[in-house]
Amino acid sequence: MAKFSTPGQRRKRYIKILLGFMVVAISTVAWFVEGPGQRTAKAALKDPGTINFQAQISNLTYEEETYRNFKGKRRSRTNYYADFSYTFNGQPIVETREISSSQYEKWEDGSQVDMMAIGPQHDKIELKSDVVSDATTSPLGRSIQAAIFSAIGAVALSFVLLPVFGREPDGYMPEGFYTEQSWLDVDDNQLIAIVENELVRFKFDSSLTGKVQKAYQNDVPLAQILTIKGKGVKLDVIPLDKVQSVSSSHYEDTYDVHFEVSEPGAKEIKTKSINLEFLNPTVKTHAMEALVKRVTPFQQLEKTVTHYSRLKSAMPGTLGFLIGAAGLWYFEHWIMMVLLSLLCLFSLKSLIARLWSPTVYTQYASQPVTSAVEPVRSAA
């Protein structure tokens, strides 16, 4: 197993354990405590004032619904509906209700079904079969239902808690995750290394993180680690004598490298860029200085430091917050509102951070480099 873990890894582990305990606790409570729906159903069955009557099914329909899951893949499901006709308090009523697939198979047009008017005022109309089902739910059934819903809630919470509270703190160099010539980022699943006269980026899938981390911390040679095969593995190699510039903002945990690429038959030398990610800005700075030191024997890189004003530094966060706020005013769908609320929160955090600590942009370059460059393409 890995010898060391980062504060971010430990925090993520604690969050997952806490969410797991939450699911277990809610499921346990559901075993011993009846929910309000079950208590209402039991009271309705015992209440002598509950009104029982029959409704006629006038139409049974279904429709296919297409949606996308969390991974963006298209899925479909079938929804079933029934039109119920009945008279209540002297008023003829026709209403459409969503029903289960088993009810759809069991019922026919013209079928008579039992209904109940429940609640303190006996004004809530329910199918009697649904009321009986709610009233007779066993402790195991309650516990399973609670486990399913709380597990879904725990997964949703993890999407918010892990990125916010599981981030790597700045200001430290994590033991076991760097050497003078290599840097392992278990957050973004990549290993950056300077091997002889080349800058190497080794990307891998999260399923390989434990394997790569274990090998790295047990002093397995870099050449052997770079040969690990598996899902998402990509290897980028940049000759140090082709590096033209290295740049980054002080708060970022990434830096950009621009380098020359000579393609066979091409008349002009192209400039490409690659973005390298690290555990935190402190590790990034260490790696950036190490790279500049190794590039210096091939060509002199001139250092330029640009201090941005607070207004300019906070502009991206301000725009993000305004876009999110405008979206909240326009959209009413709850999923969009959740996403836009998160955009507002993260943008506000960025805005405040840049007002407090304005951007300082550092660039080491042999010549001025513009942003009109072609990004590097990883080689699998």
Image (cartoon, helix red, strand yellow):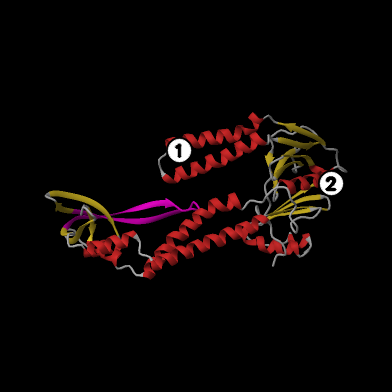
Vertical position of residue 288 compared to residue 235: above or below:
above
Q: Quadrant of residue 43?
A: bottom left
Name the quarter where the N terminus is drawn. bottom right
Q: Nearer the viewer, residue 43 or 163?
A: 43
Is 16 displayed left or right of 86 in the figure? right
Q: Residue 157: where, in percent of width, then height?
A: 51, 54
Q: Residue 258: where, in percent of width, then height?
A: 74, 40
Q: Nearer the viewer, residue 380 or 337?
A: 337
SS for dot 2: helix
Pointer 1 local density, CA inside 10 Å: few below 14, some 14–19, many at least 20: some
Q: Residue 247: where, in percent of width, then height?
A: 74, 39
Q: Residue at x 23, y 61 (%)?
A: 44
Tell me if residue 228 can be seen: no
Q: Residue at x 21, y 52 (%)?
A: 123
Q: CA distance from mark 2 to mark 1?
A: 49 Å
Q: Quadrant of residue 208?
A: bottom right
Residue extending furthest toward the left: 90
Which residue type does callout 2 highlight?
Arg
SS for dot 1: helix
Q: Residue at x 18, y 61 (%)?
A: 113
Q: Residue 294, which numbered label?
A: 2
Is 151 displayed left or right of 48 in the figure? right
Q: Residue 88, which numbered label?
A: none
Extent of the magenta region: 55-84
- Whether the magenta-drawn stretch holds residue 222 is answered as no
Q: Nearer the viewer, residue 375 or 265?
A: 375
Question: Of marks 2 and 1, which one's residue comes earlier in the chain?
Answer: 2
The label nearer to you, 2 versus 1, is: 1
Name the quarter where the C terminus is drawn. bottom right
Q: Residue 128: where, in percent of width, then height?
A: 22, 62
Q: Residue at x 66, y 60 (%)?
A: 209
Residue at the spot of label 1: 328
